[in-house]
Image (cartoon, grey):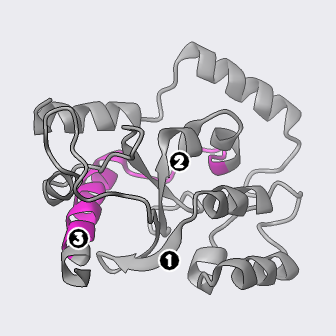
Amino acid sequence: MSDNMENNFHLENNSSDKTNGENDKSKIANETDSREPGEGRDGNEGLTEEQKKEIQKKTGWSDEIINNIGSMEEAEIYMKAGLKEVEINGKKCLIRQDIDMNQTDEDGISNKERMKRGLPPITKNGERVELHHIGQKKDSPLAELTMEQHRGTGNDTILHNKTKESEIDRTEFGKERKEHWKDRANSEEEEN
């Protein structure tokens, strides 16, 4: 698959347009979710101080990351993914630790080369890694997740408030995404 086709595929798959089946699931989830927009899953505005301390103790993540997390359920998604906090392209991020830089895609292109081109790496299972804005604001820290972790059953409504319009400019995010992967590849080279 060419880089241009790959980028178009990735942008289409990360657009806010959903299929009817996904919209139906979102409607059901929203009808059963009594939260006010912006409230955490526990009904409070984000996490409590006690929850923040618990997450910090378990993960070592900074206040900047933790203050953008909206609920314990959201934090659990990142913790189960085994994400580690680093700075990429001048921004705090939660990154995957299981990316094999030498793994190749169906075209024989290594993850290292994909990332240098601004393309997402693939996991051992062949899934493309997606970026998620923690807190859903354009300046939020980013988290590297598989599609299942990001938009899979249950996680989509935990990570995305479907009752309000996204603050993410998709065009700008496309540029940010490319820069993230390029900088991530450079960071990996510097470490080795």
- Give how far across and how far down residue 17 sits, in percent: 47, 28
Tell me the SS state at disc 2.
loop
Residue 85 drawn at (x, y percent): 50, 77
Q: Amino acid at mark 3?
A: Asp
Would residue 177 be counted in the magenta stretch? yes
Residue closest to the eye, 29 or 188: 188
Q: Residue at x 87, y 33 (%)?
A: 32
Asked if residue 189 is among those painted magenta in the image, a careful observer would answer: no
Along the viewing direction, whichever of 1 and 25 lies nearer the viewer: 1
Labels in figure, total: 3
Residue bearing the label numbered 2: 166
Label drawn at residue 85: 1
Q: Is residue 124 shown left or right of residue 152?
A: left
Q: Amino acid at mark 2?
A: Ser
6 lies above or below 79: above
- Identify the disc placed on residue 183: 3
| Residue drawn at (63%, 84%) of the image | 60
Q: Is residue 58 left or right of residue 150?
A: right
Q: Residues within 10 Å of mark 3 (few under 14, many from 20)?
A: some
Q: Is residue 71 above or below residue 156?
A: below
On screen, 65 above or below 6?
below
Q: Earlier in the sequence, mark 3 or mark 2?
A: 2
Residue in the foreground of this view, choosing between 47 and 100: 100
Q: Which residues are magenta?
A: 159-186
Q: Position of residue 53 (x, y in %)?
A: 79, 84
Task: Identify the secondary structure beneath mark 3.
Answer: helix
